[in-house]
């Protein structure tokens, strides 16, 4: 007798199997900065990638990525990502009144039209 292996989205209730619906994606307004504290470390570079696309689409040419001060791991990962991204003209540490070394400013290239 073989048993069906349950997926992560199924729950067995006696003889009933119920599938959970996937949640709707959250739509967030695009602003000149994004606070990355709310994301898991494994998600941050994907979030930055999507954010840069959205920021360019909204017409932003300068954005601020708030990664926090901590040990500098996320700062280094983000800056390495920016260094190799063709959408980014340059980047630098944010000014003291805008997060200092806890944030990175990035200047974006004009999109190809």
Image (cartoon, rainbow, N blue to C red):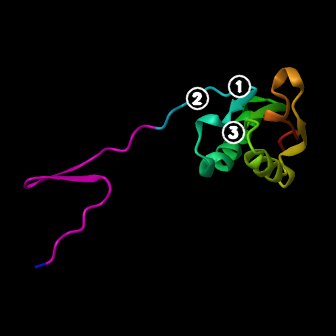
Is residue 33 one of those drawn in magenta? no
Give the farthest residue toward the top: 97
Secondary element at image label 1: loop
Residue drawn at the location 85% of the way across and 29% of the way down: 100
Is residue 12 one of those drawn in magenta? yes
Going from N to C along the chain, the mark reached first, 3 or 2, is 2
The location of residue 82, given as percent across then percent down, is: 82, 48
Magenta extent: 2-24
**Distance Cα–Cα, label 3 vs label 1:** 9 Å
Q: Which residue is mark 1?
A: 31
Going from N to C along the chain, the mark reached first, 3 or 1, is 1
Count residues near mark 2 (Cα–Cα under 10 Å), then give few for <14, some for 14-19, many for 20+.
Answer: few
The location of residue 38, given as percent across then percent down, is: 59, 35
Q: Are marks 1 and 2 in contact (CB under 8 Å)?
A: no
Residue 51: image tag: 3
Looking at the rendering, in which quadrant would you find the N terminus?
A: bottom left
Q: Quadrant of residue 40?
A: top right
Secondary element at image label 2: loop
Q: Which residue is mark 2?
A: 28
Residue drawn at the location 39% of the way across and 39% of the way down: 23
- 30 with respect to 79 (left or right): left
């Amino acid at each position: 007798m073989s048993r069906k292996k349950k997926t992560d989205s199924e729950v067995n209730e006696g003889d009933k199997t119920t599938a959970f619906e996937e949640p709707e994606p959250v739509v967030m307004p695009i602003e000149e900065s994004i606070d990355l504290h709310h994301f898991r470390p494994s998600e941050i570079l994907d979030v930055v990638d999507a954010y840069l696309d959205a920021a360019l689409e909204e017409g932003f040419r300068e954005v601020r990525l708030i990664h926090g001060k901590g040990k500098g791991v996320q700062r280094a990962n983000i800056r390495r990502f920016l260094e190799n991204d063709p959408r980014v003209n340059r980047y630098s540490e944010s000014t003291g009144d805008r997060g200092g070394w806890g944030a990175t400013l990035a200047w974006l290239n004009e999109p190809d039209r």
